[in-house]
Image (tube, rainbow, N blue to C red):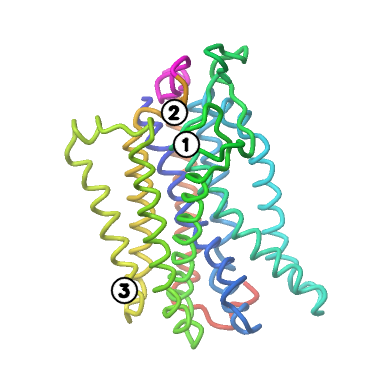
């Protein structure tokens, strides 16, 4: 049951990153590339009917995490308390930026809310990338100093925003170091391309051609940061090859990641717009899958040798609770699936100016 719920949890988070990820990317494009009011409206038109529904996946994933892996939930939410509060405020400003922009038709009102939407989207993409970098790198579980556990509960930890060394190999690494920043930048560039592909898929006009031209420099920058992150990743203590050794079919994940990455470049100007979006979606799903597989069964690695890492087995609920919860999850997932099918059916195809006030 632990493995089943772990797969469900990964599925929920990946769905959130894919769906709300193009919203983040659209916000970054709104901030940097949409220069005219017409272009800004086109960005908002592309995500308008979908952005709030996409955030449901994060709420649902949090519920799944709490129900299935309560020890992981308690440890992560207490250890990353400050960054999570910052993320919460960014979500608030992002939503306000979308909903409040056109309440008053005056530049002094519109401009700050537009900037708030763009900056919040940028920082959310960066922070989620940094968070994923922390999961890959690991944390100092138990707050071990000089070989002694400092916290009453061995799975507790506190991670400052940064450590003086700014190194992922420090005894007490911070949330931000050069490795997590690199992963954060990979996330920003990936989601920017993903957002561009969504806007290209859902809208039309000169701005679409402009975005198609912007994908190449973004792709080159992404390639550079991926190389840096991969070199660092294989040197991490948390990197495991066991799952790939025992199940060679798992090598399909990095292969699909490579295919998706190349597809983002090859299909950036394709007349079949769905190919570009499918490529960035494949890159995100298989890339996250490859990283998760390299950690399995660990969910948060321990950077010290005193306290064991958090795994799907030492953090899960009792078997009875997992079995009952699975029934309710199937019911809830069916309702969410019906809602998403309805929304995407209503707003299928290209969105024109008549959809501006969805």
- Residue denoted by label 2: 301
**Label 3 crowding class (10 Å Cα cut-off): few <14, some 14-19, many 20+?**
some
Magenta span: predominant SS is loop
User: What residue is drawn where x is 52% and y is 26%?
Assistant: 171
- Residue denoted by label 1: 135
User: What residue is drawn where x is 19% and y is 33%?
Assistant: 245
Seen in the picture, residue 261 relative to 92 is either above or below; the reply is below
Mark closest to the chain's N terminus, 1 or 2: 1
Residue 353 drawn at (x, y percent): 58, 83
Seen in the picture, residue 175 relative to 91 is either above or below; the reply is above
Secondary structure category for the residue under label 1: helix
Write down the region rendered in magenta.
Answer: 305-323
Residue 317 drawn at (x, y percent): 48, 20
Kindly report the distance in space between the C-alpha atoms of the residues bearing marks 1 and 2.
7 Å
Q: Which image quadrant: the C terminus?
A: bottom right
The image quadrant that residue 120 belongs to is bottom right
Residue 144 drawn at (x, y percent): 55, 18
Kindly report the distance in space between the C-alpha atoms of the residues bearing marks 3 and 1.
32 Å
Kindly report the distance in space between the C-alpha atoms of the residues bearing marks 3 and 2.
37 Å
């Amino acid at each position: 049951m632990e493995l089943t719920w772990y797969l469900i949890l990964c599925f929920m988070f990946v769905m959130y990153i894919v769906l709300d990820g193009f919203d983040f990317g659209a916000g970054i494009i709104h901030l940097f590339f949409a220069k005219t009011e017409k272009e800004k409206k086109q960005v908002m038109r592309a995500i308008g009917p979908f952005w709030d529904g996409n955030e449901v996946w994060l709420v649902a994933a949090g519920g799944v995490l709490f129900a299935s892996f309560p020890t992981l939930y308690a440890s992560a939410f207490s250890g990353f308390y400050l960054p999570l509060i910052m993320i919460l405020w960014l979500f608030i400003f992002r939503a306000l930026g979308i909903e409040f922009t056109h309440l008053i038709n005056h530049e002094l009102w519109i401009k700050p809310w537009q900037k708030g939407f763009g900056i919040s989207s940028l920082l959310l993409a960066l922070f989620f990338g940094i968070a994923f970098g922390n999961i890959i790198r690991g944390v100092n579980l138990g707050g071990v100093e000089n070989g002694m556990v400092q916290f009453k509960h061995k799975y507790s930890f506190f991670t400052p925003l940064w450590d003086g060394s700014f190194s992922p190999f420090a005894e007490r690494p911070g949330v931000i170091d050069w490795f997590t920043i690199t992963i954060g930048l990979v996330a920003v560039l990936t989601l920017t391309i993903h957002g561009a592909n969504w806007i290209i898929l859902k809208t039309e006009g000169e701005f679409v051609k402009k975005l198609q031209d912007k994908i190449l420099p973004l792709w080159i920058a992404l390639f550079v940061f991926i190389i840096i992150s991969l070199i660092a990743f294989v040197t991490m203590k948390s990197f495991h090859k066991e799952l790939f050794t025992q199940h060679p079919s798992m090598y399909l994940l990095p292969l699909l990641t490579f295919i998706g990455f190349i597809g983002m470049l090859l299909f950036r100007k394709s007349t079949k717009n769905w190919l570009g979006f499918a490529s960035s979606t494949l890159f995100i799903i298989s890339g996250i899958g490859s990283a998760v597989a390299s950690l399995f069964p660990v969910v948060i690695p321990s950077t010290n040798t005193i306290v064991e890492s958090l795994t799907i087995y030492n953090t899960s609920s009792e078997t009875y609770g997992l079995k009952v919860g699975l029934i309710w999850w199937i019911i809830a997932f069916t309702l969410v699936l019906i809602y998403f099918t309805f929304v995407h059916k209503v707003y299928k195809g290209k969105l024109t100016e008549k959809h501006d006030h969805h």
